[in-house]
Image: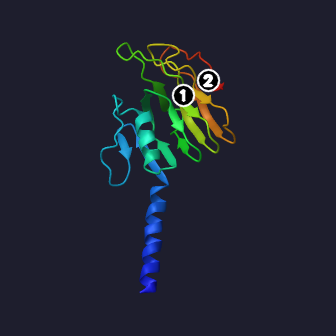
Amino acid sequence: MKKFIYTLLIVLFSISTIKAQTCLITKDGYTIPNNANLHVTNEPGGYLNDKIALAIQNGFTNINIGQGWFYVSSPIIVPAGVTIKGGGVTTYISPIVTETFPNIITSIFSVSTNGSVIKNMEIQTHNGYYDGAALCGIEILGGANNNVFENLYFGRSEGNTASTPPFIKFE
């Protein structure tokens, strides 16, 4: 009986450990085992920032974003110990400010804790409609230390528009 309980505890621990590992967000959807309602739609409630927040709320600490164009309607809050990894320069993160959604956002990413990682993506503050649709690419707030920002392209490689706000802002 003790051996059975011990084995059961190991299995339960392994399942919770797997859940806390990695999820994948793609242009066509969001992959979390046994959860079909977490698709990135690039519409209100389905923007990248909404889905990353939901993944973090579900215990994921390694969030991979596939190639494609993703919009944010508010800053992506990156807590301590979370890694957000894009699929390279063809993972575009852009604000969703349009003529019908005129809100300017403060940043694409906001970091205020320690040990976060953001890497391998293009961060755009211009969205094709407005330069300065996001006031900066990454906002680093007071108290943030020991974070990693790696292989990031700040700008706009698509179209003939440039991103001009500060790319990294320290508060």
**What amino acid type should be assigned to the residue bearing mark 1?**
Ile
Which residue, as the protein is rendered here, is positioned at the far front? 143
Depicted 69 relative to depicted 17: above or below:
above
Report whether 101 appears left or right of 3: left
- State the residue in front, 123 or 72: 72
Q: Position of residue 106 (x, y in %)?
A: 53, 22
Q: Determine whether label 2 and label 1 are within 8 Å by CB.
A: yes
Q: Position of residue 51 (x, y in %)?
A: 41, 39
The one of 83 and 85 positioned closer to us in this rendering? 83
Quadrant occupied by the C terminus: top right
Residue occupying the far bottom of the picture: 1
Q: In which quarter of the view is residue 9 placed?
A: bottom left
Among the two numbered marks 2 and 1 on one chain, the one whose residue lies closer to the N terminus: 1
x and y percent of residue 113 in the render?
62, 40
Q: At 44% from the left edge and 34% from the top edge, which residue is drawn?
A: 49
Above or below: residue 95 compared with residue 65? above
170 is higher (above) or lower (below) than 147 = above
Q: Residue at x 43, y 26 (%)?
A: 73
Q: Residue at x 43, y 17 (%)?
A: 103
What residue would you read off at disc 2?
167
- In-image side of 39 versus 18 (left or right): left
Q: Residue at x 41, y 15 (%)?
A: 102
As drawn, the label of residue 123 is 1
Give the x, y percent position of residue 72. Answer: 44, 28
**Tag 2: amino acid:** Phe
